[in-house]
Amino acid sequence: MLGPVLLSLSLVASLDLRTRASLCLSRQLRAQGDYVLGGLFPLGLAEEANLYHRIRPNGMVCTRLSSLGLFLAMAMKMAVEEINNGSTLLPGLRLGYDLYDTCSEPAVTIKPSLMFLAKAGSYHIAAYCNYTQYQPRVLAVIGPHTSELALITGKFFSFFLMPQVSYSASMDRLSDRETFPSFFRTVPSDRTQLEAIVMLLQKFRWNWVAALGSNDDYGREGLSIFSGLANAQGICIAHEGLVPLVHANKQPLDKVLEVLQQVNQSNVQVVVLFASARAVHSLFRYSIHHKLSPKVWVASEAWLTSDLLLTLPNIAQVGTVLGFIQRGMLLPEFSQYVEARLALAADPAFCASLNAEPDQEERVMGPRCPQCDHITLRNLSAWLLQNLSAGQLHHQIFATYAAVYSVAQALHTTLQCNASSCAASELVQPWQLLENMYNLSFWARDLQLQFNANGNVEMEYDLKMWVWQRPTPRLRTVGTFNGSLWLQPSQMWWPSNEVPVSQCSRQCAEGQVRRVKGFHSCCYDCMDCKAGSYRQSPDDLTCTPCEQDQWSPERSTRCFPRTLRFLAWGEPTVLLLLLLLGLVQGLTLAALGLFLCHRESPLVQASGGPLACFGLACLSLFCLSVLLFPGQPGPASCLAQQPLAHLPLTGCLSTLFLQAAETFAESELPPSWAAWLRGHLRGPWAWLAVLLAVLGEAALCAWYLAASPPRVVTDWQVLPTEALVHCQMHSWASLGLVHITNATLAFLCFLGTFLVQSQPGCYNRARGLTFAMLAYFITWISFVPLLANVQVIYQPAVQMGTILFCALGILANFHLPKCYLLLCQPSLNTPEFFLGGGPRATADEGSSGGGGGAQEHNE
C-alpha cells in the first residue's frame, strides 16, 4: 500500500527540489462548516533563542517542521471530511476545522486558544457576567499534544466549559474533574501506564531499580505516581532523580552527568525513565558520549516512539529499551489520504486555484504553519514510510481520529439527529455539548470507546521492545496489557540471551526470611526459620510461629499437624515391663497357690495364715495396677492410678507389719507380754489392724483426689513434633501424701526386725522382713530422682518399673524362701521350727539338746 504513495511523493519531491517552489499546505488547515472544531498540533518547533531570550511579548515564529504534528493534523482533517462525506453522523450538517501550530510551547499555544474563545464573527473575547449565551468561534477543541500544554489550556477552556479532547496528553492530574471539568482525552491516564510498568517489573522480578523523570510537570508527576505504586508492591527505588531539560539550564551538562553517575553508583540494571523526549535525548546523548554501562530502560510513551531518540547516533549503546504504547486501530487509507493532500499541496494548479489572500484569522494570528509550505517532500516521505511501516504512528493517528468522532457523536446527540436530519434549529453552545460528553460512548471505526467519569478512555497497551536494526531500531510487540500483563518471551531479545537481574539481594531460599539492612527493604540478609516456625510468604520479614497443635522443622514453608504421643502399649519399654509383670505376677500367684495348698502347715501358720494369703493377694493386685499406666491417659485412669496402686500395697505391708510386730514381741519383750501381744496380733484384732491401715490409706487417697487431683494434660512444647498427653500430678507434696501410710508401715517393719536377734532352732522371720523393707525403700527412694529427671513421656514407665521391682523385692525376700522350704525341704515344716515358743522356751529347749538338728537350718 505504501508503494504508490512513495512513488507519487518521490515524483512530486523531484519537481519540488528543482523548482524549490512553495507548497500550499498551510492553506489546507482551515475549512468552513456549520460547526467549527479548533485544533492544536505541534506542527513546528521554535528556536531556543527565540523562546528563552524574549524581552518583549512579540510574536514567535516556529521555523522547524515537526513531521509528527503535520500527520496528526492530517488525521483530524481526514476524520472531519469522512464525517462530512458520510451520512451516519450529523446528516445535513458540515463540520469545519481551524488548525493551529503550538510549537510545543505554552507561549505559542495561548494565542490560538484565545482565538478559539473569541466571540463568533470577531477577534475579541467579550467580558460578560454570564457566558450562557456566549457563542465562541469554535464549538470544541482537539488537542493539544502534551500534558504541559493541556494543563494550561485545560483550565482556560474549562472556564467557558468548552469541550477539549486531547489525543496525547496523559498526565493523571488532568483527570481532576473539579479543576478540568471540560477536559477529555482519547488516551488512558498515565496512572494506567505506570501500573503496567510496575507489573512488568514484578514479572521480571526487578525490585531494585532507578527512577528518573524529566524536570517538568509530566516527569515529576509520573515519578511521584510510580514511587507510590512501586513501594506498594515491594519494589525499591535505589535512586530517584530529575533529568533537566536542555533549555531549562545554562549548564545542563553537569546536572545530566550527575544524574547518570548516581544511577551507575546505585548498581541497578533497570531504569524507569518517565520523561519527555527532549530530556531523554540529552540524557542518552551524554550517556553515549561517556560510554556508560548499558541498562534496561523502561520507557514512558512520551519518548518510546520519538524519532528524536530513534535517530540518535549510536543509540544501541544505551542498552535495552522497553515500554508501553496504547493500542489503536489501523487506518489503512490514511497513507492514501496523506498522498493526496501532499500531492495537491505540491500541485501549482491546485495552489493557484486557492485564494492567495490570507484569511482574516491569519491577518491577526499570522500564518498558521509557514514551515509547512517549505518542506522537502523526499525527506517527509521517507519519514512517513519508516514510521508507518514500523507501526510507530498508528496509535497516535487513531487517537486524533477518535477525538474528532467523540465530538461529532456528542453533537449528534445534542442536536437530536436521526438517520436523515438534525432537529435543533439554534446553534449549540459549548456547555450544551459538554453535557453529552460525560460518559459518552462512541464508535471510531470498529472500536467502541467510552469516556469514564474522569474523561478518560480505557484502552489496551502493547509492550514494545527496541530491536536493533541499522540505522535505527525497530519496535517489536512483545506483550499486551489490559489490566493483566501478557508477555511473549520468544519475541524478546536480551544481551547474552539472559534476562538481566536487578536485585539488591539474592532471593532467599525456601524457609528463609529477610532481615532488612539499611534503608531499603530490598537489601537484606537471609535468616533461617527455626523449628516451630515457617515462612508464610516470600516477602516475609519474620518467621510465623506455628499454631499450638502444629510443628515444623527448620527452614520450613509450612506447618504440620502434631500427632498425640503417650506411652503406647506396643512400645519396647512397655513390652519389656509387661514381661516383668508376667514374671512377678506368676511368682506371686504361685506363692499364693502354694500357701493355700499348705494353709494348715506350721510354715503358713507361722507366716500369718490367712493374713499371709491376703498379703499375697494384695501384692498381686499391686502388680496389676501397672496396667493403668500404658495407653492414652483419660480422666478416670489418671484419678485411679495412685489409689489403686497404693491401697493394695498398704494391705500387703500391713500384714508384714503384723509379722514384724510379733517377731519383735517374741524377741524383745518379756514372755508374758509377748504372749499377750501375740494373742492380739492374731485373729480378729489382726484383721482390724489391717482394716484400719487400709482405711487410713483410703482416707489419704481421698484427700489427695479432692485437694490436688491429677489431670490429663496435652503438652505441646516438650516434644518437637508430637503432642504429649500425660497425667500431670499437682505437686511432689501431693504425691508424697499417698506414700505416708506405706512408708510408715515399712519403716516400722524395718525397726521391728532390724535389731531382733536370731532365735536358735527357729525360722528367722526378721531377716526376710528386713531385706524386704530394704528393697521397698531402695526402690521408692530411687523412684524420686528417676521420675524427676526422666522425660515426661517415660514417667509412666518409671512408675510401672518401680511398682514391679518393689513387688519383686518383697516377694523375693520374704515369700519365696518359704516357698522354697515348702517345696524343697518339707521336713523343716514343723511346729518346733516355725511355731516355737518364746525366746526363753527356745533357749531351754536348746540347752536340753532338742534343737541341735534345727540349728543347722536357721535362716
Image: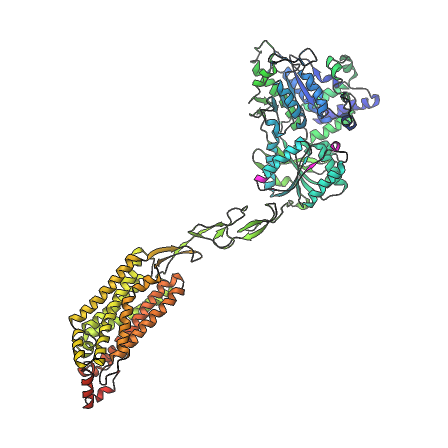
| Lateral position of residue 290 relative to residue 779, left or right | right
282 over 704 or under it: above or below: above
Q: Quadrant of the C terminus?
A: bottom left
- Please say whether residue 583 is visible from this viewpoint: no
Q: Position of residue 478 (x, y in %)?
A: 63, 37
Image quadrant where residue 202 sits: top right
User: Is residue 77 or residue 838 the one in the foreground?
Assistant: 838
Image quadrant where residue 620 sits: bottom left
338 over 640 or under it: above or below: above
As drawn, the residue found furthest toward the right would be 18
Q: Position of residue 102 (x, y in %)?
A: 71, 23
Q: Position of residue 278 (x, y in %)?
A: 72, 32
Residue 670 within the segment the image draws in magenta? no
Q: Quadrant of the N terminus?
A: top right
Q: Position of residue 484 (x, y in %)?
A: 56, 36
Q: In this picture, which residue range is highlighted in magenta?
A: 231-249
